[in-house]
Image (tube, coloured by chain):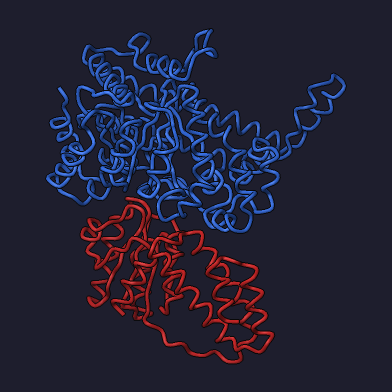
Amino acid sequence: MSQQLINAITEMQEEEAVALAQQMLDEGASPSAVLEACKQAMDVIGQRFEKGECFIPELILAGEMLSQVAKIVKPHIQQETVEQKLGKVVVGTVAGDIHDIAKDIVVFMLDINGFEVTDLGVDVPVAKFVEAVKATGAKIVGLSGFLTLAYDPMKETTAAVKALDPEVKVMVGGGQIDEQIREYTGADAYGKDAMAAVAIAKGWA
Amino acid sequence: MANTFPDNWNKLTPEQKLDWRLAAWAAIEGKPLNTPQAVANFTAATRRYIDVLKLREPDRVPRTLILGDYVAHYAGSNPGEFFYDYPKAIEATIKFCKDFDLDYGAGGNFMPGKLFDRLGYRLYRWPGGALAPTQGFQFVEGEYMTADEYDALIADPESFAMRVYTPRVMGALGGLGMVPSFFGTVELPFVPFMLAGFSAPPTHEAFKALLEANQIVLEWFGANAQLGAVTLGEMGLPGTMGGFSKAPFDYLGDSLRGTRGIMMDMYRRPAKVLAAVERLVPMAIQMGVGAANGSGTPFAMLPLHKGADGFMSNADFKKFYWPTLKATIEGIAQEGVVPMMFVEGGYNQRLDIIAESGLPKAATMWIFDQTDMAQAKAKFGSWACIGGNVPASLFKAGTPEQISDYVKKLVDTCAPGGGFFLSPGAVLDQAKAENVHAYLKTAKELGVYR
């Protein structure tokens, strides 16, 4: 049945996916088997996204399906299994910019791909990034910004986190961000979408 | 200047209407052009713009800018002053217009901040309001219409906008939710009861707020006229932005359901989404045409958002986004107003779909952002005027040489045969002055046809 669940998620059959997850649990499947099927489904969706075969509606709906499945799985979890994480990432939309949609998708995709993500939200002051890197020991920082007003805050944030820890790698992305701005900000990488962010982070982990 | 149409207006073809509007826009008579230089600039710049719209070769490539907060930053002001201190905003804008060698008027984000305060506008945050004076105004993502309200929107979009949506996004207009139906006007005995429906104190408050808000807008128009007396009157820089509208899918997705909501609705309730966007087409057309009528500048800008590459598949674009955008474009063009699509993001996957859809020739303009301009020229060049694509990042982080090279390449690719104007690909909030100068200078030198 886990293949059916994978198919339901990748084919965007929301009600079927949730019903199948419930059915698996009712029939004695372990919570981790259900979650593993979800993860495999997300891998498929991620690959399709990279190939330009699926898009934002599919990512958002998949995220919604996963959170519904997680909700029904949760009561069945006896003890928290400690999952091996790939690494820690601090993510936020830089100071002055309040856009969250793309940043949220990046956070979701990093999370689903095995990173421990600290999401600082939007309009995040430089100092808050620095504190978060200090507190978590994260070696990867993702800076999001939709508008051109994000250029300078990105530059300042990159400089500040690297001043704290030169080993920290910074990736930038967003509507008007490109390779030119990566160079301007002093960041280590520019990613054009959420899957690019995952690939970059995996390369650094 | 608002248009006064000829008596035979309704008998004119779309092309005749367009030509009438363009002639009125470009006319010297009745314009406060006070210097010979202003007349010369105005005449050349309007002619150049009409030439490229009509897919003819102009004397040289028209050079435009899409300006946000950069005007304020350049002139040593800030976005907050552009919202709240009209004299400073005017002074800064005039400085900008004088310092750069422009073809057209440069607006920046000169806005009536007091208006948004008075209305209690919640859909945006702006400098000097909830944001620091140094920040730019920004949209607040949210679900401003719930999923179960589709039927109400579809049944009566205007009533929904006034009675349900506006009270949510403008705190001072909450009382509009209680405004009674105006069908009470049809019978004498009904009228008193209709008027009794205006008794609620919040409704009184809402009307008071509307009157005061209108006063604020009129003052702001006055300030704009002061600015125009210099930029138009002395410098002869024509305005090119007559009005705005949006793709129906973006009206619904950006401002009503929100990004998350609309994207899930595409799967959860696709029929409702389709019915809603179709229902919004007449409103979207009226928005563009009405504003152009009022301003006398026959260009309506449509910033396009959620149809960009990566946002949805081509199949979904063809199903959810394009049909009603196409109907909106055609409806605006039908009235002789030029729909000017500001194609944000990339549209590389959409060019064929649009090019093959049979839009009217020489009646639309397209500002591209991250779209391949050689492809755009190949696919749009025979029927539509295009421009854009100079990256905002280059204005900020590039060198004058880099931007000059970029402009040269763009002119080489897109200018042959006409139908091309120079424009950035995105709104400029940040830039280096030397890059803006290089951008303008290069196109002026290399964009000459004869």
Relative to A146, residue B45 above or below: above
* Residue in view at x 58 percent, y 51 percent: B257
Q: Is residue B280 left or right of residue B127?
A: right
Residue B230 in sight in this render: no
Q: How many marks?
A: 0
User: Would residue B78 appear left or right of B183 to someone viewing this image?
Assistant: left
Residue B253, position as x, y percentages in the image: 54, 49
Q: Position of residue B56 (x, y in %)?
A: 27, 23
Question: The chain shown in red is which?
Answer: A
The residue lying toward the viewer, choosing from A1 and A121, is A1
Quadrant where the C terminus of chain B lies? top left
Nearest the eye: A26 or B223: A26
A27 left or right of A172?
right
Of all residues shown, which one is farthest toward the right? B189
Residue B173 x/y as whole percent: 63, 39
Residue B365 occupies quadrant:
top left
Q: Determine the residue positioned at 31% across, 80% down.
A: A205
Q: Is residue B287 above or below residue B235?
A: below
Q: Residue A36: x, y in percent?
A: 52, 83
Q: Is residue B52 above or below residue B324?
A: above
According to the colouring, which chain is blue?
B
- Which residue is pictured at 25% across the width and 16% down the height? B38
Residue B75 shows in the view: yes
Quarter of the figure that contains the N terminus of chain B: top left
